[in-house]
Image (spheres, rainbow, N blue to C red):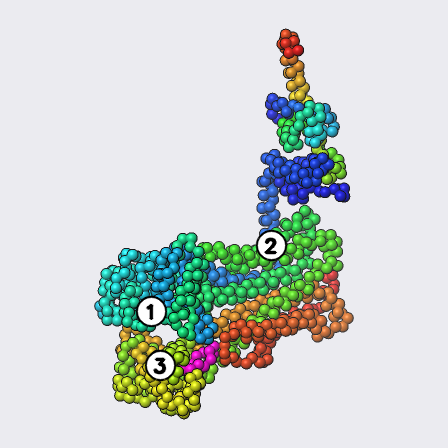
Amino acid sequence: MKKKNQPSPPLWATKFLRWYCNKQILEDLEGDIHEYYLRNIHTKGVRMARLIYILDVLKFFRIYTIRKPKVTTVMSHGLLLQNYLKTSSRNLRHNPLFSLINVVGLAISMSVGLLLVAFISEINTFDTFHKDAERIYRVNNSYAYLGKENNSRYASTSPIAGERIRESISGIEHLLILRRNPDRDITYQDKTVPLEFLWTSDEFFNIFSFQLLEGNPATALKELNSLVITDKAATKLFGDKSAINKQVTLDDEIYTITGIVAAPPLNSHLQFEVLASYTTYANANKENDNFYQWWNMWNHYVYFKLKKGQDPLTIQAGLDRISAVENNKIENTVIQMYMQPLLGIIPGDNLNNTIGTSMERKMVWMLLLLAIIVMISACFNYTNLSLGRSIRRSMEVGIRKVNGASRFQVWLQFIVEATIISLVALTVAIGLYMVLRNYFFIIDQRMDHIVTLELTLPLMGYFVLLALCVGLLAGFFPALFFSRVPVFKVLKDLSKSKVLGQISYKKILILIQYTISLTFIVAVTLIYKQYRYSVSFDLGYNTENIINLKLFGEDPAPLINKLRQFPEIKRLSRSGLVTSTGNYWAKRVKYQDPLDSASVHYNEVDENYLPIHGHKFLAGSNFIKGSEHDSAENNQVIVNEALLKRFEIGTPIQAIGEEILVMGEKKIIQGVLKDFHYGTVYSDISPFVFVYERPRYGYLNLSVSTTDIFTMMEKIENAWEKVDPVHPMSASFYEDQIKEIYNEEASMITIVGFIAFLAISIASLGLLGMVIFTIESRLKEISIRKVFGASEMNLIYKLGKGFIVLLLLAAVIAIPAAYYYVNTIIFEEVVYKTSFGFFDIVPGVLIVFGIAFLMVCYETLRAARSNPATILRNE
Amino acid sequence: MKRAHLGEFEEVVLLSVASLNDKAYSVAIVDQLDQQISRKVKLGVVHAILHRLEEKGYLKSELGEPSAERGGKRKRFYSLTAAGFAAIRRSYEVRQQLWNIIPTVVIDHFK
C-alpha cells in the first residue's frame, strides 16, 4: 500500500512501538505518528522527519500505552507448557524404541560428560584458595645446553636467581625460595617416620594462605633447625600429644617444632608434610661451590607476590636482564627465566621438575574434546531419529499451527521434548557416573591425589545445566525443522509431501558418527601396537626375572647376607638407579680437550651388575673388585660405544686404559659395552658411563628363579622387616617397572578404547534407529517389490546399499585420519616406532562393519520376510 | 465513571471533537486547535487526553477505514457520548449563568 519512492520511517522504531504498545491503541497511534512523519517529510525533510518519528515513538512510551503483562497470557503459557509436557511424554511412551535409543545413547555419552564436568570444575579450583592468588607467580626456567636440548622448560630454578630477583627487581611484595626434598626420616624418641619435606622461609606464609594452626607465622621458620609440620604429620609422629616445641632428630641433628600448619588441601599444587627453615639448608651448603651457581637450577623453586597494581611485564623485563647477565658468566648453557602465574600451574604446561601435583592442560583439553565428540554423536542420534519420524509428527504440527500455534511455540514444544529426554537420560547418567568414577581412579592412579569427583550440590547444578544444554543441542535442529513445516502441504497431502527430503543431511550425520567411531578404534589399535612394542622393546640387556629392591640409606650388608641364603635368589647386585624406567643421572665428562665437556648419563653399580643384566662387552672386562675401601677400584669406569664416538676415543680396544675426567675426577676406562637403551623409546642412545660404586641409596638387583613368586616375596619381605622396620619394602620386577613408565600410554589406550566403545555403541544405536524408520516408511514399496517377484537378497541389496556405501566412505576418511593423528601427534616424540601395516587396522574396522552389517541385514531381512498381503491390505 | 469537574484543556478537546463531528481523530483535533484558537499542542498530549476522556466515559471511539497516507493504518474517530455532551453543555451553562450575573458596571469598566 505504501507509495514507492517514499522513504519509510525507521523500521526499528516501528518495531519498538509495536512491541511495547497496547494492541487496542497500537494501530491508530502508529497511523497518527506516520501521518505526522509524512507531513514532516514535506516541511522539514526526510532526515528531520525520521528523527521526529523516533522521538515520537519514544515519547509515546507511557503508562497508558504500554502493554500490560496479563495474568491470562502467563497462565496460557503455563497451560501450553503443560500441554507440551503431556504430548511429549505421550509421544515418548508411544515410541519406546525411539525413546530407548535416545535415552540410552544420551545417558552413556552424558556420563562421560559428567565425569569431565566434575573433573574440570575441580581442576579449576586449584590454588584458588590463596589470597591474592592472581598476584602470585612462580619463576620457571627454559634451559638449553649447547643449543641442543631444545629449550626444555623447568619449573625449578637456581637459588641464586631468587637472590638476584630480591636484590634488583622492585615491584615485588614478597619473594620466597623453596627447596624440595624427597622423604626424610624424622625421629621422635623411638619412633621414626619418613616425611615429605620443603625447605622454606617465613615468606611462605606471606605468599601462600596455608593456615598456621599453632605458632607464629612471622617467626616460625626464622631460627636454624626449626620445623613446621602439618597436623596430619604431627599425628603420625606424636599421636594425640601436642607437637609444638618438641624436639626431633633429623640426620643426627636436633630440630625444634615451631608451628603446626593445616595439611595442604587436595587442590593445592604444593604438597608437603614438613616445612623446614631454609637458612638451615643454606648454611649446610655454604661450603659447596656448586650451590650458588646459575646453572644449579634443578631443585629450587622461586615464588613471588607482586605489589598491588604492578605490571607483570616490567617484572619479566627484569628477569630477562638478570638472565642475560648470568648467562654471560657461564659457557654452553643458556637459561632463560620466565614467570608463570600461580593459577596457571594447574592445569598448565608440560614442565620438567614439577613440584607436587601436576596436570597438563593438554590432557584436560584432550579429555574435553573426547567427551564433546561422544556427546555430539549422541545428539546426532536424537536429531536423526526425530527427523526420521517427521512424517508422523508433521501432522500434529500442522494441526497445532492451524489452531494458531506460532513458529516459536512449535519450536519450544520440540525443545521441551528433547529436554525431557535429556533429563531422563541425566538420571541414568548419574548412576553410570558413580560407576565410571571408580574406573577413572583405577585407570590413572595419580588422579586419587588430584581430584575427589564427589557429588556435591553445585556439581549437581552443573550436571542439570549440562543436561539442559544437551537437550537444547539435540532438539535444536528438529525443532527448527518442525517449526518450519509448511502447514498446507502437510495437511493436504501428507503422503506426497517430501517432508522426508532431508535424507542427505541425515546421511551426513551418520557418516560423521561412523567416521568418529572408526577413527577411535583404528587409533586405539595403533596405540596399542606401539605400546606392546615399547614394553617389549629389546633394550640390549636382560631385564627378565630381576627384582629391584629399593634401599633407604641403611647399610644393606645384613640384608644382603640374609638374601644370599635364599635358594630362589641366584645372583645379586647393587645399582644407583634403575635404567630404562625414565630416570636419569648425569655428570660432566671431559676427555683430553679441557674445553670440551659433555653431560653424560651414568649409573653407579657394583661388580655383579653387568653380568646379571647380560650387558655385552666389546672390549675390556667387568669391574675388578678390590679390597674394601680401596680407592683404586673406584677409578674404573665402563662406557658405551656412543661415548667413544662423542669424544672420538677410537675403537673399543684402543679405548681400554684411556683416562677420562668425570666431574673432574680421573677415571680409567675398564671396559666398553655395546650400545644399549637405558632410556625409553622416546629417547635416542647417548654417551653413558657405569661408575663403580656401592650406593647406600639405590637398589638391590635380585636375579631370581622360582615358580612360587608369592612365597618368595613373602620371604624377602620378612627379611626386609628385620633389617629396616621404618620403611615399607618397595620391590618390583624390572619388567613391571618398565611397563610402569608406559602407564600413560596404557591409560590412553584404556580411555580412547573406552571412548571408541561408546562412540561405536552410540553410532550403532543411531544406525539401528535409522534403518528401522527407513524401512518402516518403505514397507509398502518392499511389499510391492515382493509381489512382483523380488528375492530376499535383492531386497537386502536394495535397502542396505545406501548404508553400506556410507560405512565405506567413513572408513576411507577415518583410517588415514587416525593414522596421521597417532603417528604425528601422539607419538611425535617417539624415536623408536613400530611399523603400522594394513593388517593392524583390519580387526577394528571389521568389528564396526560387522555390527553395522548385522543390524542392516537383520532389519531388512525382517521387512523382506513380512507378508506383503497383510501390509498392502491395511492401506 | 467519574463525575468529576472538567479540566480546561479537557473541555477544549471535547469542544473540538464536537465541532469536527464525524472527522474527529487525533491529528485533526491537533490541527483544529491550531487553526481555531491558535493553540499549539503536541500529538502526545492530545492523545493522552483523548484516552483519559474515553476512560471517563465522555468520549467513545471506533476505527475508520484504512487509507494510504498513514502507512495503511486506520484512524480512530472519536465522538461524544451523552455524558460528554452533558459535560460541555453544563460547563457552557455554568459560564453562561455566571456571565449573566456579572454587573454591567464591571463589564463597562473594561470597555
Residue A534 placement, left or right of A181? right
Residue A694 is tagged as: none
Residue at image point 32% right, 76% down: A729
Q: Is residue A15 left or right of residue A369?
A: right
Which is nearer the eye, A70 or B47?
B47
Quadrant hosting residue A76? top right
Name the amino acid, label 1. Tyr
Mark 3 closeness class: few <14, some 14–19, many ≥20 residues within 10 Å = many
Disc 2 and disc 3: Cα gap in Å? 73 Å
Please tell me whether mark 1 sits on a helix, a strand or a loop.
loop
Q: Earlier in the sequence, mark 1 or mark 3?
A: 1
> Can residue A450 be found in the magenta stretch?
no
The quarter of the rendered structure image containing the C terminus of chain B is top right
CB under 8 Å between discs 1 and 3:
no
Q: Amino acid at mark 3?
A: Val
Cα separation between marks 2 and 1 = 66 Å
Residue mark closest to the camera, 2 vs 3: 3
Which residue is pictured at 52% across the width and 55% down the height? A465
Which amino acid type corresponds to the residue marked 2 in the rendered image? Ile
* Percent coordinates x, y for residue A352 in the rendering: 42, 70
Percent coordinates x, y for residue A365 in the rendering: 51, 65
* Above or below: residue A101 compared with residue B81: below
In the image, the segment drawn in magenta is A676-689
Q: Main secondary structure of the magenta part?
A: loop
Q: In the rendered image, which quarter is residue A514 located in?
A: bottom right
Q: Which residue is mark 3?
A: A662
Q: Which residue is located at x 40 percent, y 78 percent?
A: A599
Of the numbered discs in the image, which one, if any, rests on residue A415? 2
Give the distance between the C-alpha atoms of the residues marked 1 and 3, in whole angstroms.
Answer: 21 Å
Q: Residue A292: which numbered mark, if any?
A: 1
Element on which disc 3 rests: strand
The foreground one among A855 and A246 is A246
